[in-house]
Each structure stands twice: as C-alpha cells, then as structure tokens.
Amino acid sequence: MNQPQVKTITRAVLLLAVFLFLSGCSTAYYATMEKFGKEKRHILKDKVEDVQESQEKAQEEFKDALTKIKELYSFDGGELETFYNKLKDSYEDCDSRANEIEKRINNVEQVAKDLFKEWGEEIAQINDAKLKSSSTKSLRDARTKYKKLETVMNKSTKGMYPVLTKLKDYVLYLKHNLNAKAIGSLSGEVVSIEKDVAKLITDMNASIKEAENFIKNF
C-alpha cells in the first residue's frame, strides 16, 4: 500500500472516530484514537486548541460586526440596503461562531470528565503507597489547572450573548426601517455595543492565553 493510500485510510478512520465522539460513542472513539497513540490527555489538549482557534476567529468576526455598525452610523447617502446586508452577514458569522465555540467547549468538558474519571480509577489500582500518593497529587493539580481554564472559557463564552442580542436587534430593526432616520435613532447605541465588544475581546484574550498555558503545562 503506497503512502497516499495510507494517508487516505488514516484520514477516513480519524473522521469516523470524530463522528463516533459526536454521536456519543465515546468508548469507541477513545479506543480508535488510542490506536493512533492519542490518549485522553492528548485528546483534551487537541480539544482545547479547537476552542482557542474558534475564539481567535470569533474576535475578528465581532470586531468586523462593530466596524459594520460604525459604517452605518457614518452613512451619508448611497445604497442603505448594502450596509444592512453587510451587518446581517456579520451577525450571522458571529452567531455561527458562538454555536461552534459552545460545542467545542462541551467537547472539552466531556473529554476532561472522562480523563479524570479514568485517572482516578487507575490510581485505585496502584498498590505502592508512595506512587499512589504522587499520582493522586498529579490528578489534583491537573483538576485545578483544568478548572481555571474551564472558568475562563465559560466566562468569555457568556460574554458573546449580550453582544449577539444587540446585533440581532439592530439587524431586525434595520430590516424593517431601511432609512437614514432609523440609523439616526440607533446612533446612541454604538457606544454601548463598542464597550460590550471591547470587554468580550478582553475576556477572549484571557481565555486564549489560559488555553495556551494549559496546553504547554498540562
């Protein structure tokens, strides 16, 4: 079997493993990944990287939505519907990304739960008191590191929804009122959403940084 064929088969098996995980067949998923040298610890790091990647993309998409709002408020003629469509597209990108981040964080939480459960069960099988004590301490430290990460990730995720709510309000309002007067009536809101986006970016930066530390030190 040549190398391209091996790569194709490997990719297909890994895709099947992901499908099994998403379908709730975690035991089969872990068994498949172990055949490729991927233990739960490695999988957890990979899942954290997935969240980190999505949050980096989300930052840019929320910034882009804010830019579109500012463009609307500086509107001085032209095709208003074009501006509206741009804002609508930005909102949909942000909403889709938020759903992706939620799912990826859920995956992280599931793998962490399974990892720590397995770790605890395996510690119970160790007979040597010193080794058992050392492994128990390692588990305790790992839980602490993970809990810190989980808290920061969830905080940044919750911060997306107030911004999404406002974006949706603007999109729906403009859909029904495509005129310069309607834009004027929303002008006071730009400062509010700008603050929300700034806070969201700060929280996401903290989450991305914590994810990086977790990946390096876990």
Image (tube, rainbow, N blue to C red):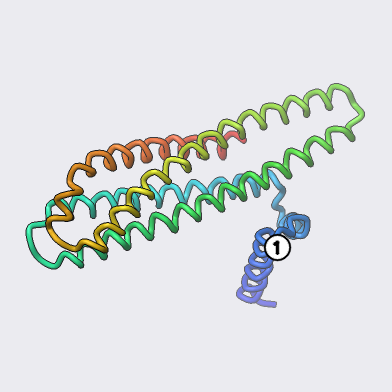
SS label for mark 1:
helix
Q: Quadrant of residue 202?
A: top left
Task: Using residue 6 as the reference point, say whether residue 184 is left or right of it.
Answer: left
Task: Using residue 25 as the reference point, say whether residue 80 is left or right of it.
Answer: left
Position in image of residue 142 (x %, y %)? 66, 32
Q: Quadrant of residue 197?
A: top left
Q: Which amino acid is tagged 1?
A: Leu
Position in image of residue 96 (x %, y %)? 44, 58
- For mark 1, what is the residue? 20
Which of 105 and 160 lies nearest the eye of the viewer? 160
Q: Residue at x 56, y 47 (%)?
A: 105
Position in image of residue 127 (x %, y %)? 92, 29
Residue lying at the far left in this picture: please name it: 76
Which of 126 and 189 lies nearest the eye of the viewer? 189
The quadrant in which the N terminus is found is bottom right
Is 143 located above or below residue 7 in the figure? above
